[in-house]
Image (tube, grey):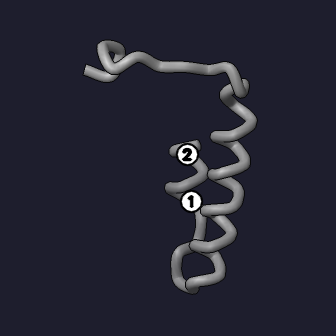
Amino acid sequence: MQELSEIWPRDQQRYAAWFNVVNEAYVKASYPKHYEITREALI
């Protein structure tokens, strides 16, 4: 996803909004609903 964020146009607010929608869909599709992460894993 980082590669996409590097080339995504940012010169208008609507492009940023579209990127946020795509990014949210990517994140939600990447992790199943039962996905959990422990506090220890984040440290």
- The residue sitting at 47% across, 19% down in the picture is 37
- The residue sitting at 54% across, 55% down in the picture is 5
Residue 9: image x %, image y %?
A: 58, 72
Quadrant assignment, res 43: top left
Point out which mark residue 7 bears: 1
Residue 24: image x %, image y %?
A: 65, 51
Point out which mark residue 35 bears: none
Left or right, residue 36 beside residue 42 = right
Q: Callout 2: helix, strand or loop?
A: helix
What's the residue type where badge 2 is placed? Glu
Indicate whether 37 appears above or below 24.
above
Indicate whether 15 appears above or below 19.
below
Quadrant assignment, res 40: top left
Quadrant assignment, res 14: bottom right
Q: Residue furthest bottom?
A: 12
- The residue sitting at 59% across, 64% down in the picture is 8
Left or right, residue 43 beside residue 36 = left
What's the residue type where badge 1 is placed? Ile
Indicate whether 2 appears above or below 32.
below
Q: Callout 1: helix, strand or loop?
A: helix
Q: Residue furthest left?
A: 43
The CA span between labels 2 and 1 is 7 Å
Residue 16: image x %, image y %?
A: 57, 73
Q: How many marks?
A: 2
Q: Which residue is mark 2?
A: 3
Dot 2, crowdedness within 10 Å: few (<14), some or many (≥20)? few
Dot 1, crowdedness within 10 Å: few (<14), some or many (≥20)? few
Q: Nearer the viewer, residue 6 or 36?
A: 36
Residue 1: image x %, image y %?
A: 59, 43
Q: Are marks 2 and 1 in contact (CB under 8 Å)?
A: yes
